[in-house]
Image (tube, helix red, strand yellow):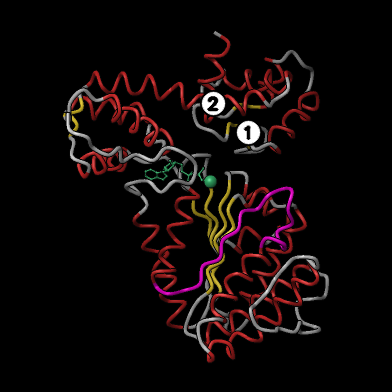
Amino acid sequence: MEYLLNPFKPGAGRIPPELAGRAQLVAEFRQMLFQARETGEGDRPWILTGLRGVGKTVLLNQLGREATELKLMFVKVEASASAPLANSLAKELHLALRRVLSTSDKAKKIWHASARALRSFQLRVDPTGAYSFGVTVEPQLGVADSGDLATDLQELLERIGLAAREENTVLLLAVDELQEATAPDLASLNMALHNLGQSISPVPVLFVGAGLPSLPAVLADATSYAERLYDYRRIGLLDETATTTALVVPVQSNGAEWSEGALNEAVDATGGYPYFIQAYGSYIWAARATNLISLDDVEIGVESARAEVDRGLYQSRWERSSPTQQAFMAAMALDAGDPSAMSELVVRLGKKSTTDISVNRRDLIRSGLIYMPQRGSVAFTVPGMHDFITRQEA
Ligand SMILES: Nc1ncnc2c1ncn2[C@@H]1O[C@H](COP(=O)(O)OP(=O)(O)O)[C@@H](O)[C@H]1O
Ligand SMILES: [Mg+2]
């Protein structure tokens, strides 16, 4: 058999060979970018939410590429519980400003005030950090250095936005894993974005955050108006048509074909879960006996992919949980992937009241393994976790 390249890209954040099922959302976003550039005004911030492995990171990066294609500024950070949001923002905004400052003398003039505001901001949040602009930039006293993150972030983004408007460009600011940020950081972010949006002519700064399904509740806990502030977009599993496209297009462009039965079986096996589409696709490709993928190939491929998915997706999450957390999740697994009522878990775990299991719930939410789809119920953030747990116990 001639040597063909495996098109599939299993693994977090890897650009899929075909970004299936997201065209409408991407087109809507591109329109917003275009509008912001033409009018010089910002728009409502977006929040993308979804389970692990549905493609939020990949989508966020795609939105960034759309911005870059329109010659707009794209700045992305990943929130984490260990680093303050302000530090990561200061670092990445600095790199972006450094880049635009170096493009021309005219740009130096236009972006000078932004660079000074950033210098003030940075001296406050990260005084020891190394931030060189290649030219001397004095901090602008009294701007973005009050010590109140909400005010400082707003002032900083305003300065950058004013320069962006003058340059006919837009700043797209993206934060991945936003649910990881601390509550005070989220409150400050909400407030800064809220205030920017209140202006008569909001500066052309667009924001997109991405995170787990718990994110809307986390943001609403930080400030009550978060619910109205953001445009929430749920990133779900792919439907059958999109799943088929995600499997067929890469295979065909790399010189192979699916037999009909094989394709149906593969679509079914993935359940429309993007992480599985890439992992199963990759193993099926490797298992194929000829360039016409058969049902046998699919069965062998899916079987070997499962072992890898177990290691990559489930095993480490399971093993870093304590025995009582594991018991909690095993009780959840009985609901076969549907949300579990806390009242029911109490019974299954032989406890008296939900307070007896609320510490486990809190810790599992904190470590990103479960979330609360509604008050009084919990669900796994990773699709298929229940199945893995059931197989552990067998
Ligand atoms: N729309 C899509 N079509 C096909 N594969 C996708 C799509 N979105 C994501 N993937 C694949 O799914 C996997 C998980 O994507 P990722 O962006 O890391 O998910 P998340 O950030 O939601 O956890 C990656 O292998 C990626 O290539
Ligand atoms: Mg991600």
Sequence-first disc among 1 and 2: 1
User: Residue 369, labelled with which disc?
Assistant: 1
Quarter of the rendering occupied by the C terminus: top right
What crowding class fits label 2: few (fewer than 14 Cα within 10 Å), some (14-19), or many (20 or more)? Answer: many
Left or right of 69? Residue 109 is right
Q: Position of residue 362 (x, y in %)?
A: 74, 34
Q: Residue at left 22%, top 25%?
A: 262
Q: Amino acid at mark 1?
A: Leu
Q: Kindly state the secondary structure of the residue where label 2 is placed.
A: helix
Q: Nearer the viewer, residue 115 or 70?
A: 115
Q: Is residue 10 magenta?
A: no
Establish if 255 lies above or below 351.
Answer: below
Q: Position of residue 30 (x, y in %)?
A: 39, 67
Which quadrant of the rendered structure holds the N terminus?
Answer: top left
Quarter for ligand 1? top left
Q: Which mark is residue 385?
A: 2
Q: Is residue 233 left or right of residue 346?
A: left
Does the residue at mark 1 contact the one at mark 2 (Cβ under 8 Å)?
yes
Q: Amino acid at mark 2?
A: Met
Residue found at the very far right of the displayed protein: 147
Camera-side residue of 171 and 358: 171
In percent of width and height, residue 231 lies at 53, 60
Residue 66 in the image: above or below residue 305? below
**Residues drawn in magenta:** 70-88
Q: Residue at x 32, y 47 (%)?
A: 18
Quadrant position of residue 193: bottom right
The image quarter in which residue 389 lies = top right
Give the alpha-carbon distance from disc 1 to disc 2, as whole Å. Answer: 9 Å
